[in-house]
Amino acid sequence: MSRPEVGIEPGQRITILPAAVADGIAAGEVVDRPAAVVKELAENAIDAGAARIDIRVEAAGQGLIEVVDDGQGMQPEDLPVAFARHATSKLRALEELRTIRTLGFRGEALASIAAVAQVEAVSRRRDGGEGFRVRIRGGELLTAEPVGCPNGTRVTVEQLFFNTPARLKFLKQPATENAVISRLVGELALGNPTIAFSLQVDRRRVIETPGTGDLRATFAAVYDSETATAMLSIDESGVRGLISPPALHRGTRDHVVVLVNGRRIQHRNLVFAIEQAYRGLREPDRFPLAVLNVLVDPAEVDVNVHPTKREVRFRNERAVFAALERACYRALRQSPLYELQASAGGPMLELRELTPHPERLKRSPGTDAPLAWADGPAPRGGREDGPRLPPLAYVGQLLNGYLVAEAPDAVVLIDQHAAHERVLFDRILQRLEGGEPASQLLLIPHDLDVTPSQLAAFQQQESWLETLGFEGELFGPHTIRLRAAPSDMPEGRVERVLGLLLTDLAGERTPDRRLRETAALIACHSAVRFGDAMSPEAARQLLSSLAVTEEPISCPHGRPTTLILPDDQLRRLFKRP
């Protein structure tokens, strides 16, 4: 059927959009930011059977995006047609859509990119023949000519969104766009470990994977070798990949990569299935790292439900969910480091949770009415209505983790880590709210290897990190040289804390709205550890500092700092009158 002529008759209100407008709308669905261009071009290279894919980005993708592969290449007569709408070599009949195995199939990507940029594509078939080049600007073919070139395809995109200025207004800061691109390429590399990926951003190499087929080696290239070594393997009939042990976690879900038959997807329920396997093994606000490929019969999954193919629909989602959860559960429980065993006997002593206000624990003589420890120190800032600790006399340390103190008519046990965490939290939060950084120069600068997203977060939030007390500079494509750290933090923990902070800051977060979370993170990793010996002088100072905090009975994460055992309960336990 021929396309109706564009035009509006008198009184007519519905008409066919001009081709340029229709192409612009289609481009907006597929190409919403520079990372989408990288995704479409890289997936085309994967579908072409490439063994190596080199990606180059400048000016956050607005200046240049170039993807070079050594795949099959295209014939001269095919290259110009590839930029037409709905032109594809991957689909011929509707029935084939039900069993599609390629990442692309709609034939919209190249046309959409060419509609909003200046594009040059050069390609030569792997099996011989001459090379060919086309140049397109704003959807208009400028040149098509033979050219000498190596096997494979090179697509260069410049002046992205030059004819859609409204789209430019919605782009984020360059560091954010670069971080999105880096994360995308890392996920593509993790989903295709047999392909060697390289990513260069503003002439700086940020990703280089070996392409040997070893997923753990690819994971090490995207993250780091220490994290890759700690990951647990899953190799079952329907699920394959890596998941982190319970002790290894992050503050966001950004590090959970789910693939279906090699296609990276966004699927909330499948991510939840992975998290369910960690129930009881980690804190609820922490999330695992994972790269898991779910293998499903292509006829059982519909990949044609989203313009950018980010989402899929399963014929039997419940079965996929259960298989994924079981695979993760078995890997976590069978790991020798985290094997769970049921206890043979019951508890010898049951502790019930006490009221959060310790002043209610002591009763007036001869009555059941609560009596407050009125002579306890007042919290800093003059709060009189908050929880108060009784006067504490230090007795000693137990098991290198608990401080023992005596209060009027009571024994008090103090978790030294939780108590120190509370003291540091109040101190750090007060500094942050007042904008008063407290740094100390490191005796020897620390070189911290970071991921691309962490590096982008460091560049974007450098002033905020200086407010926290961290001072550093770039020292290579994957490295930050740290010169100063918060004054309360032991030097041996500086690198880990900064890495965790950069992970939490990665993405589009406003850090100054997360004062309490940041203060809690720094306090937790700066506090004396459970198992560290403490001198009597340090223990007494800790008890004194704890008593004047605003919430002395719990740490910033809600765990108790103190357990109080009144004398009348001790007498009852020992069956004394």
Image (cartoon, grey):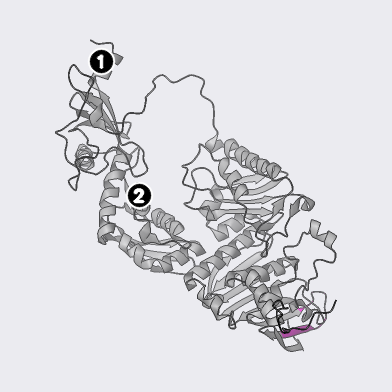
Residue drawn at (20%, 44%) of the image: 383
Residue drawn at (54%, 54%) of the image: 255
Residue 101 in view in this figure: yes
Q: Residues within 10 Å of mark 1 (few under 14, many from 20)?
A: few
* Horizontal and vertical percent position of residue 341: 54, 28
Side (left or right) of 496 relative to 356: right
Residue 469 in view in this figure: no
Foreground pick, 366 / 437? 366
Tell me where residue 187 sits by quadrant: bottom right
C-alpha distance separating marks 2 and 1: 38 Å
Residue located farthest toward the front when viewing the structure as drawn = 11
Mark closest to the chain's N terminus, 2 or 1: 2
Height in image: 94 above or below 146?
Answer: above
At label 1, the amino acid type is Arg
At label 2, the amino acid type is Ala
Foreground pick, 159 / 420? 159
Side (left or right) of 222 relative to 260: left
Height in image: 98 above or below 317?
Answer: below
Check disc 2 and report the residue beneath it: 520
Q: Residues within 10 Å of mark 2 (few under 14, many from 20)?
A: many
Counting every numbered tag in the picture gives: 2
Check disc 1 and report the residue beneath it: 571
Location of the N terminus by quadrant is bottom right
Magenta region, residue range: 124-134
Q: Check residue 419 for magenta coloring.
A: no
* Horizontal and vertical percent position of residue 88: 78, 71
The disc placed on residue 498 is none
Foreground pick, 475 / 300? 300
Side (left or right) of 239 relative to 359: right
Foreground pick, 461 / 398? 461
Which secondary structure, mark 1?
A: helix
- Image marks 2 and 1: residues in contact by CB distance under 8 Å: no
